[in-house]
Amino acid sequence: MKTRLVYLIRHGEDDPSVRGGWGNSKLTENGIEQVQKLSTYLKENCKIDKILSSDIERARQTAEIINSKLNTAIEYTEKLREMNNGLLAGMKNSVAEEKFPGVYFNTLEIDEKFPGGESPIEFYNRITKDFEQLLEENKDVLNIAMVTHGGVINAIYKYINNQEWSNKIKSVKISNACFYALEINEKERKFIIENYTVNG
C-alpha cells in the first residue's frame, strides 16, 4: 500500500505592520532566518519530491529558500493563496483601521465578503476544493511540500479531521516557518506531525 506524505509549511515571519491576505509583503530578516533553519532540517530529515507554493510573495520567498537546499521540482499556484482580503491586501494597519474600522477575518459574517475580496465560507470552500485538486494533479508524486499560509493550513487541518470550521472558531496553533505532516494511504488520511518548528 502506497503511503504519501504532504508537508504543509507556513511561510516565515513577514511585515506585521501591514494586512496580509493577498498582500505581497516580503519576509523580515527574522523570517528569512527562520526559513533557512527549517530548510536545513527538511533537507536532513525529510524526503520531498516536489514543492507546491502559493504565488504570494512571502510564500514564494519561503519556497525558494527551502528549495535552495532541496533542489527539487517547484511549482507556484494560486490554489494555495491565503484568504482574499480585497482592498485591505498589503494595506498598512493604521490606514486599514481608518478606512475599514473593525474589519477583520474574525469580525466578518460567514458569508460576508472583505471589501473587494471573498467571504470566509468562500475561502474555506475554495481551499478544500483546491487542496483535493492539487492532490489529484500530483497523484504520482510521493512526498509533496505545500508552502502556504496559516489560514490555509487551518482550513485543511479542520477539513481532514472533520472538525467544524468557522472564522469565529480559534485556529489550531500554526507558527511561522512550521510544518504539519499529513500521511495519506488507501485507508486513511491523518496528521502525524503538527506545528513542528526548529525556531523554538
Image (cartoon, grey):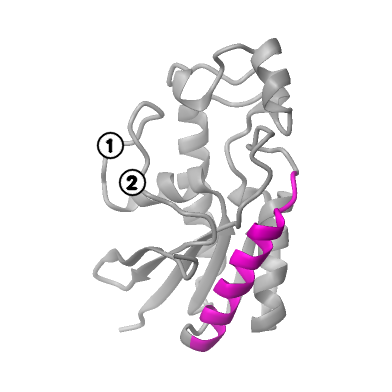
- Give the residues in magenta: 25-44
Residue 77: percent from left, percent from top: 68, 55
Residue 62: percent from left, percent from top: 66, 63
**Is residue 2 placed above or below 32 in the rendered structure?**
below
**Is residue 155 placed above or below 2 in the rendered structure?**
above
The reply to whether residue 62 is in sight is yes
- Please tell me in which quadrant of the rendered image residue 95 appears: top right
Relative side of 186 to 113, left or right: left
Q: Residues within 10 Å of mark 1 (few under 14, many from 20)?
A: few
Tell me the number on the disc at residue 164: 1
Relative side of 177 to 64, left or right: left
Q: Amino acid at mark 1?
A: Glu
Residue 84: percent from left, percent from top: 63, 33
Q: Nearer the viewer, residue 92 or 164?
A: 92
SS for tag 1?
loop
Cβ–Cβ below 8 Å for labels 2 and 1? Answer: yes
**Is residue 65 placed above or below 89 in the rendered structure?**
below
Residue where numbered disc 2 is placed:
158
**Is residue 107 placed above or below 11 in the rendered structure?**
above
Say which label, 2 or 1, has the lower sequence index.
2
Q: Amino acid at mark 2?
A: Lys
